[in-house]
């Protein structure tokens, strides 16, 4: 049964220095509030896993929380580059960052394998690309039935996965809808999980296409209204495209970024 | 990047988007990357291809956005979609088995065999420029029945050999796709702001097959990093019609502001 807790308690209990942490949400329902709490609590040496690092990991990386990034597309969607990520990779600021790079199909299948209790996943992918030369979690496997050679990717099993959802009931059952990305797989692949939600309700009324995560498959639920902003929560609020654009300016400059950290309540 | 020399009525970017839109046929199923490909595919749907099926890697199938999305995961894509599936499903059930007719991609670098780089300029471990990376592009390039590439024609982008193969075109020549087990046909056209390149049927090398109005062969060659061959049947693209231009200019990006006349800011990454 998922415990219903505050965000700060949940992060304190579930996210530890050195953990492999996945904060998922494919453009939609990105758990920004949880990311900011990780920054405030000063976690270090995290291996951050996410298909699209987005602003949330640019912020965690800039704040010095990460030593490694596992990802498949590292841009500011619709705007351009992630400048804190680039600064960490190019200049080791504020700390050196190791990367492990995949394609979206590869990352999605790594979560599927993790959620399925398998050591690896099989896909048609990567053939002829340069990624396998640099990424040790990409290999090949021969089909025992046809002899065909296919790509194999190692399972992802994060120490902790954090996602944001529209709502949960008081027992901790979680419901999310709209673009649901890899959230289900990322939660089920993880040793521990935290779901932040827009609201906790008495009853989860059915929604077409919704994903439901049963209470017994989730470690903790925290009510955090607006917890996905500046990304969006379908049915609650829209994506703040202006904030995504504004991040380009803030993140380009170390001083401007440090000012942003101060506003978040973090001194450095 | 100004207007084509002989016509002040439209920009080179507008010609590119319109030429790319024209390449899509009604009823095709199209896997769309954000930026230029998304603009072109949504334009086609508003013009001659109302039955064009748009699939975005966020899992939105047959989406009909009233405005252009800024990212591949905008809410407007969900609201207008026939259905929304998970990310593993969109790649494993819809893309991988070959259910998609056309993959529409862009890139930071493209080489003579249509290979795309969206990963790094320079060495991987110490790059001159770190780009966003793969996103969905490698498998789109591998598994769609055919691929169209749309990108601005610049010497730094059209290179002899890409610094990093993010997505495979024809590899090192005509036999590579089959050897690699790639089941789609690969890039069948590259639409730029200067003209159109298509693979030579024998060598798979990209050759110039069409010029946009007012563009000279020498201009294209000057912006191409390999010894670009010119097709003996070189065509000239029809200039944009009033309806095409009006429709393109009427497409607004979600939450856009005055800086957003051109909705494409992300040619660095083929997709997200």
Image (cartoon, coloured by chain):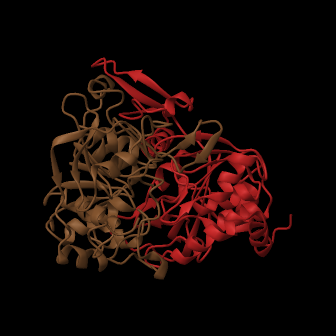
Q: Looking at the rendering, which quadrant does residue B141 occupy?
A: top left
Q: Nearer the viewer, residue B94 or B247?
A: B247
Q: Position of residue A206 (x, y in %)?
A: 36, 71
Taking the spot 62% from the left edge, 56% from the top edge, the residue there is: A219
Residue A184, placed above or below residue A156: below
- Work out whether residue A6 can be spotted: yes
Q: Looking at the rendering, which quadrant does residue A242 occupy?
A: bottom right
Instruction: State which quarter of the image contains the N terminus of chain B.
Output: bottom left
Q: Position of residue B84 (x, y in %)?
A: 33, 62
Q: Position of residue A69 (x, y in %)?
A: 64, 46
Residue B148, placed above or below residue A201: above
Residue extending furthest toward the right = A268
- Work out whether residue B63 can be spotted: no
Q: Nearer the viewer, residue B54 or B36?
A: B36
Q: Looking at the rendering, which quadrant does residue A180 occupy?
A: bottom left
Q: Nearer the viewer, residue B232 or A11?
A: B232
- Label tally: 0
Which chain does brown denote in the image?
B
Residue B196, placed above or below residue B173: below
Instruction: State which quarter of the image contains the C terminus of chain B.
Output: bottom left
Which chain does red denote in the image?
A
């Amino acid at each position: 049964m998922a415990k219903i807790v505050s965000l700060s308690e949940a992060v304190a209990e579930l996210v530890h220095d050195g953990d492999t942490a996945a904060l998922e949400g494919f453009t939609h329902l990105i758990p920004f509030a949880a990311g900011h709490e990780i920054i405030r609590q000063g976690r270090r040496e995290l291996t951050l896993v996410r298909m699209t690092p987005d602003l949330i990991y640019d912020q965690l990386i800039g704040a010095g929380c990460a030593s490694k990034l596992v990802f498949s597309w590292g841009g500011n969607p619709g705007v351009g580059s992630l400048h804190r990520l680039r600064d960490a990779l190019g200049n080791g600021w504020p700390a050196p960052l190791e990367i492990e790079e995949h394609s979206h199909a590869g990352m999605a299948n790594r979560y599927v394998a993790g959620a399925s209790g398998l050591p690896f996943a099989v896909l048609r992918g990567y053939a002829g690309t340069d990624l396998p030369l640099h990424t040790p979690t990409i290999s090949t496997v021969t089909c025992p039935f046809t002899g065909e050679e296919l790509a194999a990717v190692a399972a992802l099993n994060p120490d902790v996965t954090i996602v944001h959802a529209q709502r949960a009931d008081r027992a901790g059952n979680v419901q999310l809808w709209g673009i649901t990305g890899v959230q289900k797989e990322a939660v089920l692949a993880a040793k521990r999980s935290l779901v932040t939600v827009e609201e906790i309700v008495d009853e989860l009324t059915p929604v077409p296409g919704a994903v439901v995560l049963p209470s017994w498959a989730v470690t903790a639920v925290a009510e955090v209204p607006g917890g996905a902003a500046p990304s969006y929560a379908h049915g609650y609020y829209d994506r703040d495209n202006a904030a995504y654009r504004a991040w380009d300016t803030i993140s380009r400059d170390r001083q401007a970024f440090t000012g942003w950290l101060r506003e978040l309540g973090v001194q450095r | 990047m100004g207007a084509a020399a002989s016509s002040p009525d439209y920009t080179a970017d507008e010609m590119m988007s319109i030429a790319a839109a024209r390449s899509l046929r009604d009823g095709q199923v199209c896997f769309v990357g954000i930026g230029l490909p998304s603009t072109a595919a949504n334009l086609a749907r508003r013009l001659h291809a109302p039955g064009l099926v748009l699939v975005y890697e966020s899992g939105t199938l047959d989406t009909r956005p009233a405005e252009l999305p800024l990212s591949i995961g905008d809410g407007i894509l969900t609201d207008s979609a026939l259905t929304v599936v998970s990310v593993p499903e969109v790649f494993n059930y819809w893309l991988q088995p070959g259910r998609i007719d056309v993959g529409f991609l862009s890139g930071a670098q493209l080489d003579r065999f249509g290979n795309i780089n969206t990963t790094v300029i320079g060495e991987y471990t110490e790059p001159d420029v770190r780009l966003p990376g793969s996103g969905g592009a490698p498998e789109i390039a591998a598994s769609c029945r055919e691929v169209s590439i749309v990108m601005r024609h610049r010497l730094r982008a059209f290179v002899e050999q890409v610094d990093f193969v993010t997505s495979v075109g024809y590899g090192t020549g005509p036999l590579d796709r089959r050897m690699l087990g790639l089941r789609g046909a690969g890039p069948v056209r590259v639409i730029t702001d200067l003209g159109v390149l298509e693979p030579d049927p024998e060598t798979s090398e990209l050759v110039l097959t069409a010029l946009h109005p007012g563009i000279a062969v020498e201009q294209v060659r000057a912006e191409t990093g390999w010894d670009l061959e010119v097709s003996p049947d070189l065509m000239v693209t029809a200039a944009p019609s009033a309806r095409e231009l009006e429709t393109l200019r009427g497409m607004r990006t979600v939450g856009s502001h005055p800086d957003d006349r051109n909705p494409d800011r992300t040619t660095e990454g083929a997709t997200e």
